[in-house]
Image (cartoon, rainbow, N blue to C red):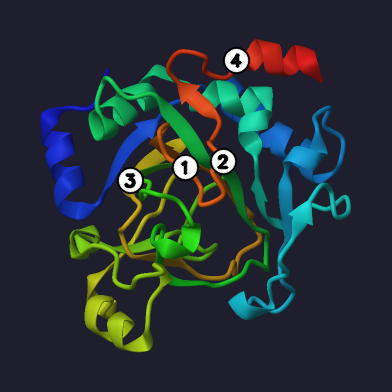
Amino acid sequence: MGITQDQWGQYHRDGFLRIGSQSDRRELEGLQERIDEIMLGQAELDYDRLMMQLDSSTGKYDDVSGGGKGLREPSLNYRKIQGLEYDALFLDYMQKPIFREICAYIYGGHASVACFRAMFMNKPAQLGTELPWHQDGGGSWHIDRDPLVTVWTALDPATVENGCVQVVAGTHQLGILSEQGHTITPEQEARFCPMESIVDLELEPGEVMILHNWLLHRSGVNRSDISRRAFSACYIDARTRHDNGNQYSLIFGEGAMNPQELAQAV
């Protein structure tokens, strides 16, 4: 079943939309096992295509290392792994018909769609790093147009205790709040993110939400004994170019990446 017009109306109003689980138990378990294999260095893939960043030990955003290409060390305490469109299992998940429908609605049915980033986000048990209020767009991304939609899939339960995403509904309608985008000022936080307006996006494993990239969002540390793993796929108009002229991996459209070919190439 696709997304109804009423649901799209809710998305335009709030800047986010829950669309339920889009995978069966076997597929979800496969994604969970696969990301653990990747973190432990046990996966058969080209690690040089991945940007891997370990979590901080303090929980402070400013203490997170820059990370880099390839496996830093075998560990389940990675904070972020980018480049998962180059893994056949995650690519296959990204190319589900429901996600193509979402992209066609956002960018137009005529548009080919690429991946700006396919990213694992993790808050290990009793760890995790606080992510301040921010927007996913603006000049700091060095591309010629802003991505407009991110599909976020919970791989574990996402709860207030383990650092679920928090948003302020409707703030995507403010546009990008600074020329460079990303984080906002303390004054903007006080004005646009009052405590009484914060929505906790608690999700069950496998549950999916759509986020407008301009929606103000944040997350805290993990104070529980359960990790908070998630897969975040940001889709863009395939005509998007980086400042250096580079294009992005094609997900939907003629010549799109193929999971079977990717698996055979390993």
Q: Which mark is residue 148?
A: 3
Q: Which mark is residue 246?
A: 2
Q: Earlier in the sequence, mark 3 or mark 4?
A: 3
Give 246 or 211, whichever is nearer the viewer: 246
Could you say whether the residue bearing mark 1 is in a helix, strand or loop? loop
Give 154 or 11, whichever is nearer the viewer: 11
Label 1 and label 3: CA atoms lie apart by: 15 Å
Could you say whether the residue bearing mark 2 is in a helix, strand or loop? loop
Label 3 and label 2: CA atoms lie apart by: 19 Å
Residue at 48 percent of width and 64 percent of height: 140
Q: Are marks 3 and 2 in contact (CB under 8 Å)?
A: no
Q: Which mark is residue 241?
A: 1
Q: Amino acid at mark 4?
A: Asn
Q: Which residue is mark 4?
A: 258
Quarter of the figure with residue 58: bottom right
Residue at 29 percent of width and 79 percent of height: 195
Label 4 and label 1: CA atoms lie apart by: 22 Å
Q: Amino acid at mark 1?
A: Arg
